[in-house]
Amino acid sequence: MLGLSSVLCAILAPLSFAARELPASALNPSLLSTGIRNLGNTCYMNAQLQCAFHIPLIRKLALNTGDIALDPTLSSEDAVQLEESSAKIALRELFTEMAEASSKQLPAIFPRSFCLRLGIPPNVQQDSQEFWKLLLPALEQESITDLYKGSFEAYITALDGSGRERRREEVFLDLSLDVGER
């Protein structure tokens, strides 16, 4: 037997928000969101999503329907994807609602559909950084994920004078730094 959230996700999954008309101001770089309402313990998620929404390039990439003719900045990998991830659809829907609320000066939106589609329990506190690290790969859109990636080269050199060394590039979405006293 399917649970309520499984049934709701199955109902919501086929819905396409690509046909929904965006307000003209949606891609305006100076657009300010009216915000996202807290559903219980979703402040960690709201903070990350509102920050992303206020970065014009991320908003543009998230609101794009995948049509390469509409946005030449998309990589060919992004453009050829026939199936969009449920995370990408959920993010586009949320950003569309945020843009509409802002353009019509409506109050903050409720992210219920976003949480349902991604299986995020609204009454469970989570870590903002962990949420973002899990959402980025789920979007399956390199043009967004690449904006948050970095890399460094790890290397080891033998001290015995043999000239042996090993180099390896490491990709990261976050970087931990030790902060200590001197």
Image: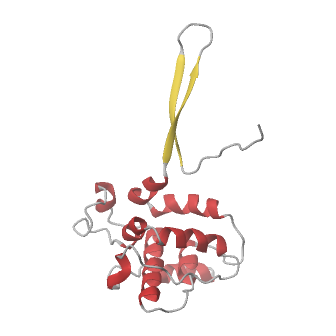
Instruction: State the residue lying farthest toward the top.
Output: 161
Q: In which quarter of the image is residue 127?
A: bottom right
Residue closest to the eye, 93 or 56: 56
Instruction: State the residue lying farthest toward the left.
Output: 69
x and y percent of residue 1 in the render?
62, 79
Q: Quadrant of residue 82?
A: bottom left
Q: In this view, does 43 lie to the left or right of 162?
A: right
The residue sitting at 24% across, 70% down in the picture is: 70
Instruction: State the residue lying farthest toward the right.
Output: 181
The residue sitting at 40% across, 56% down in the picture is: 142
x and y percent of residue 105 in the render?
47, 91
- Colouring scheme, one of rainbow, by chain, secondary structure, one colour: secondary structure
The residue sitting at 45% across, 77% down in the picture is: 95
Residue closest to the eye, 32 or 9: 32
Residue 182 against residue 128 in the figure, above or below: above
The residue sitting at 58% across, 23% down in the picture is: 156
Q: Is residue 41 left or right of residue 93?
A: right
Q: Does residue 113 appear in this view?
A: yes
Q: In this view, does 174 lie to the left or right of 87?
A: right
x and y percent of residue 2 in the render?
60, 79
Give the total of numbered labels. Answer: 0
x and y percent of residue 5 in the render?
60, 80
User: Which quarter of the image is occupied by the C terminus?
Assistant: top right
Q: Quadrant of residue 37?
A: bottom right
Residue 67 against residue 149 in the figure, above or below: below
Q: Does residue 13 appear in this view?
A: no
